[in-house]
Amino acid sequence: AQSVTQLGSHVSVSEGALVLLRCNYSSSVPPYLFWYVQYPNQGLQLLLKYTSAATLVKGINGFEAEFKKSETSFHLTKPSAHMSDAAEYFCAVSSNTGFQKLVFGTGTRLLVSP
Amino acid sequence: GAVVSQHPSWVICKSGTSVKIECRSLDFQATTMFWYRQFPKQSLMLMATSNEGSKATYEQGVEKDKFLINHASLTLSTLTVTSAHPEDSSFYICSARESPPPGTFFNYGYTFGSGTRLTVV
């Protein structure tokens, strides 16, 4: 079975500061990993995905994540936070077998203060 | 890019009635669609996976007779909450996975609808 663990239900940063959202995965097969963002009462928007190509993945809005197999991690970073980055962020894992369904972490709420 | 239209965006219904939620892929064919439920301030819980032309596969603990899923075409999947009760109130989100390009097998494009807020009174 696959799973992801997001450390920290809430992360607070100041505008302009580094954003680091943590995600660790568990998978018995090569994982495919995703980061999504959700704004209140909206669906999910894909930030980036790792599908066994380059380990450093660049996404939209200045976000990037690095796949580290040795650490089973896929942490999301952004060098400089903007107020508009305040939202809920979900890490998810899938595989290349079966229905390829996504399994989500519990989410991390990013708070950005002026 | 790929767009999934989900509606209604919100619905209020009386206890005991049924509610249908539609999920349409607008500019691509979706072999597989997923239905999620999200409680306030919680993560998404997968309810079921539907493949066009076949019966949906439900996750453990999800009542298939209560949450009817139909995936009649490559662009449309519906979720019907039958005999709704207040405990069914939640945010429901669909996701469509694009059919792989010709000559390939896997595609990892998941596009989400904007969600439906269901309130049962």
Image: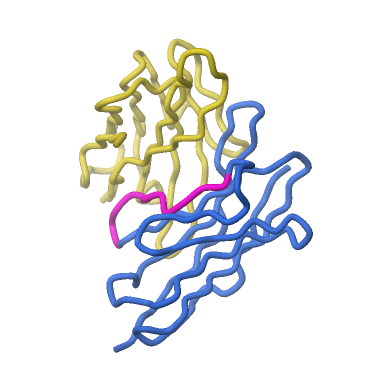
Chain colours: A blue, B yellow
Residue depicted at x 46% and y 33%? B34
Residue depicted at x 49% and y 58%? A90
Quadrant in the picture for the N terminus of chain B: top left
Vertically, is A55 above or below B97?
Answer: below
Q: Is residue A107 left or right of residue B94?
A: right
Vertically, is B61 above or below B72?
Answer: below
Looking at this view, is A107 or B105 the one in front? B105
Where does the image place residue B106, in percent across and percent down from the top left? Answer: 56, 25
Q: Residue B72 lies in what quarter of the image?
A: top left
Vertically, is A50 above or below B104?
Answer: below
Where does the image place residue B42, in percent across and percent down from the top left? Answer: 47, 61
Q: Is residue B97 left or right of residue A55?
A: left
Asked whether residue A29 is drawn in magenta, I would say: no
Residue depicted at x 55% and y 30%? B58
Where does the image place residue B37, in percent across and percent down from the top left? Answer: 44, 46
Q: Which residues are magenta?
A: A40-50
Vertically, is B101 above or below A40?
Answer: above
Looking at this view, is B8 or B113 the one in front? B113
Asked whether residue A46 is drawn in magenta, I would say: yes
Where does the image place residue A98, in percent across and percent down from the top left? Answer: 64, 26
Residue depicted at x 28% and y 33%? B21
The single residue placed furthest to the top in the displayed view is: B53
- The secondary structure that dominates the magenta segment is strand
User: How many numbered marks are there?
Assistant: 0
